[in-house]
Image: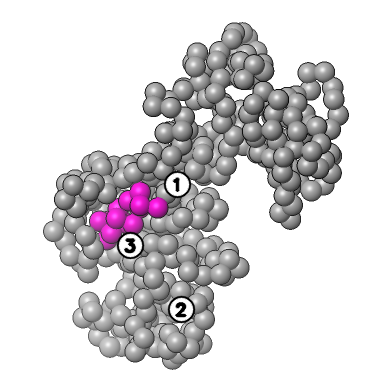
Amino acid sequence: MPQIRVVNVSKRYGSLTVLEHVSLNVEDGEYVSIIGPSGCGKTTLLRCVAGIIDPTEGEIYVDDKSLVGVPPEKRNIGYMFQEIALFPHMNARENAGYGPRVRGLSRRRVRTMAGEALEMVKMSERSEDYPNELSGGARQKVALARAVGSAPSVLLLDEPLGSLDASVRLSLRMELRRLAKELGLTAIHVTHDQEEAMSISDRIVIMRAGRVVEVGKPQNLYLDPRQIFTANFLGEANFMRARLMATGENGAILDVGGEELNIESRTVPRDSVVAIRPQFIRITKRQVEGSGWRGKIAEKTFLGDVVRFQVNLENGFKITAQMPPTAQDVDADVGDEVSANFQRDKLLTFPCPTEGLEKELSAW
């Protein structure tokens, strides 16, 4: 099983820099997803690994072998495009066998490998059907069979589920991971769907403006990100500027908009930013001294599994809280005065960005 190493890769088109000094390691058999804002360089990086485009500078290795100058068909890499891009004049079996055929394998071997690939994606019964006779989900399965049909060691997936309905995406995303793991492939999956990335990935790469911001396991990036941008991009968070008042054995006390906030960390910079995700905020209609920050509900939205509240706090901050529909006080409505209580061990703190919080949160 191969390890992929991207070392100091940049890609420029004239004065436009799409990738800037990107370095990344993907371990043997790992399933890694790359996410980030549109135009951040995700697909460009994937195409550099595939050999579809050449980097302006830097090196790419698979199993410590440089891919510089190696054409795509010689890299032993399966690539699944964002556009399904099946050959319309070929049936499912012929599409699945395209890779082995262009490698010059015998007709019998091509047919065997195509049949095995279709069997893996449970499309054997549709092997004689043409793309226009298949549903979107079925076409995507055939595209996956084509990507793995030539027995690659690396699988690259560029928004492979982006054009499908939500219900179909949900079933196919786990199929992708299962197939990659069963075949022992090292996989890089580019997606704009954060839930998709978190549900199938061993690790996630966060990109922004042609650079890698942070890399980590999904749970770590979500619950304990090192960067403000990650906390904002992966999921949702409320951000508030804060100032350190005091530290002690039980943590630190911050001044946040005139309100005191106790946090567990004792290594907090004097000027900082506090972040808290909506699901770690509880609102209550009861007025108990010191029970939370007071405010008024500005919006309430029922989303099925959760209820979202927009609350205008008395200290001037606007926060989003999220609670299950069975939670106590979830019947609070727009205009009601409530208290917002933060789950202390889920508060995140970051140094105040030198260029300002708004700049740090932006895609560029």
Q: Position of residue 39 (x, y in %)?
A: 35, 52
Question: Along the polypeptide, which appears first: circle 2 or circle 3?
Answer: 2
- Crowd class of label 3 (few under 14; some 14 to 19; many from 20; radius 10 Å): many
Give the vertical position of 77 relative to 140 (above or below).
Answer: above
Question: Along the polypeptide, which appears first: circle 2 or circle 1?
Answer: 2
In magenta segment, residue 44: yes
Would you say the residues marked 2 and 3 are in contact, meaning their CB atoms lie under 8 Å apart? no
Tell me, for residue 153, which label it has, or none. 3
In magenta segment, residue 148: no
- Crowd class of label 1 (few under 14; some 14 to 19; many from 20; radius 10 Å): many
Question: Which secondary structure, mark 1?
Answer: strand
Would you say the residues marked 3 and 1 are in contact, meaning their CB atoms lie under 8 Å apart? no
With 66 as the anchor, is 224 left or right in this view? right
Identify the main secondary structure in magenta: helix
Give the vertical position of 33 relative to 75 (above or below).
Answer: above
Examine the rendering and report whether any part of residue 153 can be seen: yes
How far apart, in angstroms, are the residues tagged by discs 3 and 1? 20 Å
Examine the rendering and report whether any part of residue 264 can be seen: no
Type of the residue with mark 3: Ser
Which residue matches tag 1? Answer: 204
Q: Which residues are magenta?
A: 38-50
Q: Position of residue 211 (x, y in %)?
A: 32, 42
Q: Position of residue 269 (x, y in %)?
A: 49, 16
Type of the residue with mark 2: Arg
Residue shown at 85% from the left, 25% from the top: 287
Q: Which picture quadrant has residue 73?
A: bottom left
Which residue matches tag 2? Answer: 139
